[in-house]
Image (tube, rainbow, N blue to C red):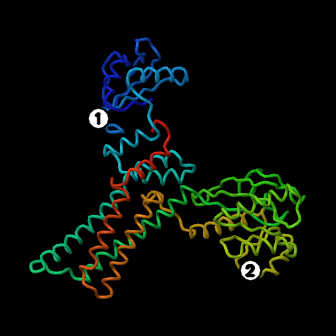
Amino acid sequence: MRVSGDGVPHLTARLVRSKRPLQPRVATYATIVDEDGRTLDRGLAIAFPPPRSYTGEAMLELQIHGSPVVAREIVRALLACGARLAEPGEFTRRAFLNGKMDLHAAAAVADVIAAETRSAARAALANLGGGLANEVRRLRASLTCLLEELAGAIDFPEEVPAPDPTCLKAALTPLAAHLERLLRDGEHGRLVREGLQVAIVGPPNAGKSSLLNALLGEERAIVSEIPGTTRDTIEESIAIDGVPIRLVDTAGIRAHADRVEADGIARTQRALSAARIALVMIDGSQPLSAEAKSVLAQTRDRERVLFLNKADLGQVAGRELDDPDAIAGSVRDTQTLHRLRRRIARLGWGGERFDLERPHLASLRELDAAREALDALARALRTLEVGDPPDFITGELQRAFSALGHVSEQVGAEEIVAGVFARFCIGK
């Protein structure tokens, strides 16, 4: 239980009893009492004087027993002595406002809490250290030097010579390359954090539920030889190269279905529309049915993995399709499952491995700001390449400098700040 603010010393003196005074950042065995001096619990008390605390303010941490009654009574005593309940994310918001962390690092706190995989946690922790802010500051410092040089040449043309265009291009090119790398890492980080949805679609009895079970390594979906067994969508998650993959097993698509099965097919169509990748399954041991041809036609113009299941029983459908990208195999074959995973990785993120220890852009706001900065640098480079005077690029460099300021510096609008902390839990 944590309390932060100017009133912490008063609360500590009134509610915490110990044989010796609390030492900064040292756990001390203490008795916690209410506003009338009645004992509520015995536990550990830790005092954090400013500015060496999470929020930068005076802070008190109480480690108490887990009884809901005890916790409720201590909260009531704190409120009776002048404290109030924290709003979502208020502790981290105060840390941001007091200069303890930048907005990017503050958002990383929420990402650490919300991480669903080990990779997502590692990526969030990389951002928590403030490394991205240092990179952005170096980029802005380089732009500052160029802007100062251009400003001197514009304001004092007789004393300050105009910068050499070749030197300007040599200075701007690595800055643009650095931004391209940040944007690429940001897209990778977004995938690790948010995951990728893959819809398993196909005609009835193609083996979709068997594939879901095989990829999960457990019997999650009911498998039957009776067509139309799956009437609803089933969603489960696996990880490929640290990226969460949300697999959606869907009802088989066919033209003639009863009302209940038709409802399942409608949900299949919605899942297919929402998915980034369609994993299209057909029975490779049989000639292409009308339902299989229909599914193939529906998914022809989108990202898809074409899987010819039951190919160990024959490859009739494969000869009809003549598609070099189709994967023929069986859901019972581990090599086939490996090939499917690699194909999903290639379509989803190019199949490359991520450096999760490197700080990266996390929010859409940061990605948009970096894209604007890169666009400004690209325009500046094109201006120099066509031979226009160097001072023509001043506006673009100023735009890039301003855009980068919205990545991690404390220049965000109030609504942006509020949006970052709105997704926090109470007390963090």
Lower position in the chain sequence, tag 1 or tag 2: 1
| Dot in front, 1 or 2 | 1
Residue 353 at x, y percent in the picture? 53, 65
Asked where in the image residue 175 lies, by quadrant, the reply is: bottom left
Residue 210 location (% of width, % of height): 79, 58
Label number found at residue 393:
none
On the picture, is 130 further left or further right than 428? left
Residue of label 2? 323
**Badge 1 vs badge 2, beta-carbon distance below 8 Å:** no
In the image, taking residue 11 as reference, residue 168 lies left or right, namely left
| Name of the residue lying farthest toward the left | 159
Q: Is mark 1 on a helix, strand or loop?
A: loop
Q: Of residues 279 and 406, which is closer to you in this image?
A: 406
Image position of 82 with respect to 323: above or below: above
Q: Where is residue 392? Give x, y as percent.
A: 27, 79
> Is 54 in front, or is 293?
293
**Which kind of residue does numbered mark 2 sit on?**
Asp
Instruction: State the CA–CA distance, disc 1 to disc 2.
Output: 67 Å
Report which quarter residue 397 is drawn in: bottom left
Classify mark 2: residues with Cα within 10 Å, few (<14), some (14-19) or many (20+): few
Q: Quadrant of the C terminus?
A: top left
Residue behind mark 1? 50
State the residue at coordinates (57%, 49%): 116
Task: Report x, y in % for residue 197.
Answer: 64, 60
Circle 2 SS class: loop
Judge whether 174 appears above or below 33 on screen.
below
Kind of residue sitting beneath label 1: Pro
Q: Is residue 236 above or below residue 428?
A: below
Q: In this view, does 235 lie above or below 351?
A: above
Looking at the image, which residue is at 83% across and 75% down?
315
